[in-house]
Image (cartoon, grey):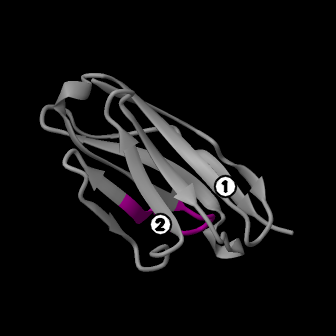
């Protein structure tokens, strides 16, 4: 089993920055990729960014150039640096991990609110 715990959400003004963290525990040896999704009120969960064990990244078009995903393999932690935040970035952000043995696991989510 893979457990994921997110942190770092909060309230920020437009143009500001936040860094989200997601720490994995349990069967971390089986994880081959981790990423972030977001879900705004009344909308479906949407892909934000992903990073593989080899460091290959991909991003949603809406966050390219503003968000950066990275990982610390020694700490089994993935980060999402969010810059130039916009009100439309407001959502609950969920971390996910893809495992060869457990499929996809999700964290509990962390709220990001961008408002003046």
Mark number for residue 112? 1
Horizontal relation, residue 11 to residue 95: left or right: right
Question: Residue furthest toward the right?
Answer: 116
Q: Counting other residues with Cα less than 10 Å from the Cα at mark 2, is it few (<14), some (14-19), or many (20 or more)?
A: few
Residue 66 against residue 30 in the figure, above or below: below
Mark 2: secondary structure: loop
> Which residue does the image show at 27% across and 23% down from the upper left?
1
Closer to us: mark 2 or mark 1? Answer: 1
Q: Earlier in the sequence, mark 2 or mark 1?
A: 2
Q: Position of residue 106 (x, y in %)?
A: 39, 41
Q: Does 87 appear above or below 99?
A: below
Task: Name the residue nearer the viewer: 57 or 113.
Answer: 57
- Residue range of the region highlighted in magenta in the rendering: 39-49
Instruction: Inspect the magenta stretch and tell me whether residue 1 lies in it.
Output: no
Q: Nearer the viewer, residue 34 or 90?
A: 34
Q: Is residue 43 magenta?
A: yes
In the rendered image, is residue 70 in sight? yes
């Amino acid at each position: 089993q893979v457990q994921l715990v997110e942190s770092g959400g909060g309230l920020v003004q437009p143009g500001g920055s936040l860094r989200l963290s997601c720490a994995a525990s349990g069967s971390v040896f089986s994880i081959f990729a981790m990423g972030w999704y977001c879900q705004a009120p009344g909308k479906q969960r949407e892909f934000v960014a992903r990073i593989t064990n080899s460091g290959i990244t991909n991003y949603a078009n809406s966050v390219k150039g503003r968000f950066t995903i990275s990982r610390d393999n020694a700490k089994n932690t993935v980060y999402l640096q969010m810059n130039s935040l916009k009100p439309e970035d407001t959502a609950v952000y969920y971390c996910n991990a893809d495992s060869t043995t457990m499929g996809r696991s999700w964290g509990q989510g962390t709220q990001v609110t961008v408002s003046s």
